[in-house]
Amino acid sequence: MVQSLVYSINGDASRANKAQTTAQSLYRSYEFPSIQLKLHEAILHAPTDPSNALNEAVKIMQDLSPERRIARVRVNARRVINALPGPACTLPAAQDLRTLISAQSPATHL
């Protein structure tokens, strides 16, 4: 899974896709590693297709109940924003994603 993140951040689509496919086969779609891998894909595409990457990251976060938006998921969602080209940071979906990231899950208040 680390390879997926590293290749995604570095924009190496071929290696990132291979790492993601291999890793996804190990997890069920609802497990946290699978969710993180989906966010890695959004990280990969954020520099070249910011609108779609943001929309995908927002959908991933919205599909999670607040208590499942744990720190490791929020960190990867933040990486999508960090990978955006400058002008894309002002897109409405970027603000939506920031809002979802900053919303604390009930478990983090304990």
Image (cartoon, grey):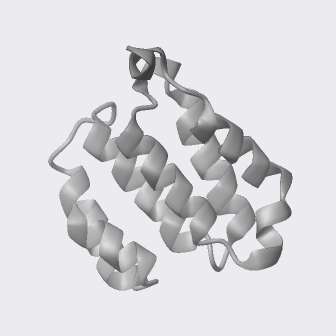
Looking at the image, residue 7 sits to the left or right of residue 55; the answer is left
Q: Is residue 65 visible?
A: no
Judge whether 75 appears above or below 47 on screen: above
Above or below, 94 against 28 in this view is below
Where is residue 82 drawn, in percent x and y? Answer: 59, 67
In the displayed structure image, the side of residue 86 where residue 75 appears, left or right: left
The residue shown at (46%, 63%) is 41
Kindly indicate the quadrant of the structure image that contains residue 59. top right
Viewer can see residue 93: yes
Residue at the (19%, 51%) spot, across then down: 25
Measuring from the top left, give residue 102's x and y in whole percent.
61, 37
Q: As displayed, is residue 28 above or below residue 2? A: above
Q: Nearer the viewer, residue 60 or 17?
A: 60
Q: Position of residue 76 (x, y in %)?
A: 44, 54
Residue 47 x/y as whole percent: 63, 78
- The answer to whether residue 85 is left or right of residue 56 is right
